[in-house]
Image (cartoon, grey):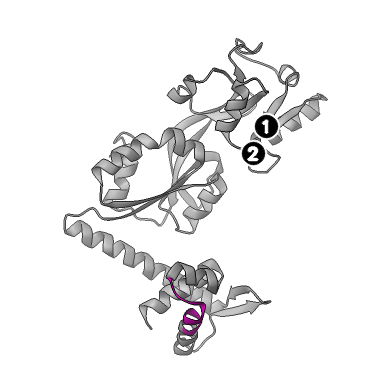
Amino acid sequence: MEWQQIIGFYQVAKLGSFTKAGDATFRTQSALSQQIKALEQELDCHLFERIGKRKLRLTSAGERFFEFAEAILESYDCLKEDLSELQGLQRGRLRIAAPFTTLYHLVPEALKDYMIQFPYVELTILDRSQQIVIELVRNGDIDLGFTLESEVPKDLALLRWKKVETVLMVPVDHPLAEAKRVTLRQIAKYPLILPPMDLRFTCRRILEERFHKLGLDYQIVMESSNVELTSHYVEMGLGISFATVVRDLPALEKRKLAFIPMNTLLKPDFIAVVMRRDKVLTSYKSAFINILFGDGLG
């Protein structure tokens, strides 16, 4: 069994395609097929079965070998990191994923400090939705993810980071701007900018359920899943909207917007740092968490 065979098999199994795996390993589809065939001959079993013309599925033996390959590749990465630390070097990779707003507003300063302290660590930063972040963490494709705590499944570990709350965004000169509390009847009177009707956007679903229950008519003037885009159009007076925000964020204070707490609609939540429970972080990866929390985690 050769090292490249293990890598080739792992990529084919993970990506579900010889073509995609070939791109990931810089090998031709033919070369990968030959590697897998040789591996199956050595192990005396089939690792894949084809479903139709393009789909691949792991056999029972293939699933067992995938667990072996995943474990050995992860152990290899840990070994390289440990050897670097023994030599007094802080080399390796730190892979992070978070939704756009978190990356744009909350993470940059911590990353800037981290890059100064660990200049030889290779950073990979991905702008992804919360659901994709969770899957990337679960699959081991990233080391740390950022999502709302309420979205984190129980099989993953989390560290509570920043409190967020749902607010109503209105222009500063809007009739509702001075209100400390507004009702759904008041909100329904104005054009709304809401996220798409999707299971990912809890606020929209809850809001529309409440409107229907109260028999309220309402107008949706725009759909947007990006808070930055939404806030821009709220500021120009197109409509009012909702956002889940960290209060007292300097970037928000610069906008000509008023933020009215809507805790009666949705309870406050927290942004959490998410990782796999079986993941052992090296010292330079743990250092990023310490920077995020102001060294409050030791």
Disc nearer the start of the sequence (2/1) = 1
Q: Residue at x 49, y 89 (%)?
A: 44
Q: Quadrant of the C terminus?
A: top left
**Corner quadrant of residue 4:** bottom left
Query: Residue 199 colored magenta?
Result: no
Rendered view: 154 above or below 174: below
How many numbered marks does the figure carry? 2
Q: Which mark is residue 194?
A: 1
Is residue 203 found left or right of 61 in the rendered image?
right
Q: Residue at x 29, y 51 (%)?
A: 121
Q: Is residue 297 visible?
A: no
Q: Residues within 10 Å of mark 1 (few under 14, many from 20)?
A: many
Marks 1 and 2: in contact by CB < 8 Å? yes
Q: Which mark is residue 94?
A: none
Q: Position of residue 149 (x, y in %)?
A: 51, 40
Q: Is residue 3 visible?
A: yes
Q: In what element is the residue under mark 2? A: loop
Near-viewer residue (88 or 125)? 125
Secondary structure mainly formed by the magenta segment: helix
Near-viewer residue (255 or 155)? 255
Q: Residue at x 31, y 47 (%)?
A: 286
Q: Which region shows up in magenta?
A: 26-34
Near-viewer residue (22 or 150)? 22
Residue type marked 2: Phe
Judged by depth in the image, the label closer to the viewer, 2 or 1, is: 1
Q: Position of residue 79 (x, y in %)?
A: 28, 64
Q: Position of residue 261 (x, y in %)?
A: 58, 20
Is residue 217 found left or right of 106 in the rendered image?
right
Q: Which mark is residue 201?
A: 2
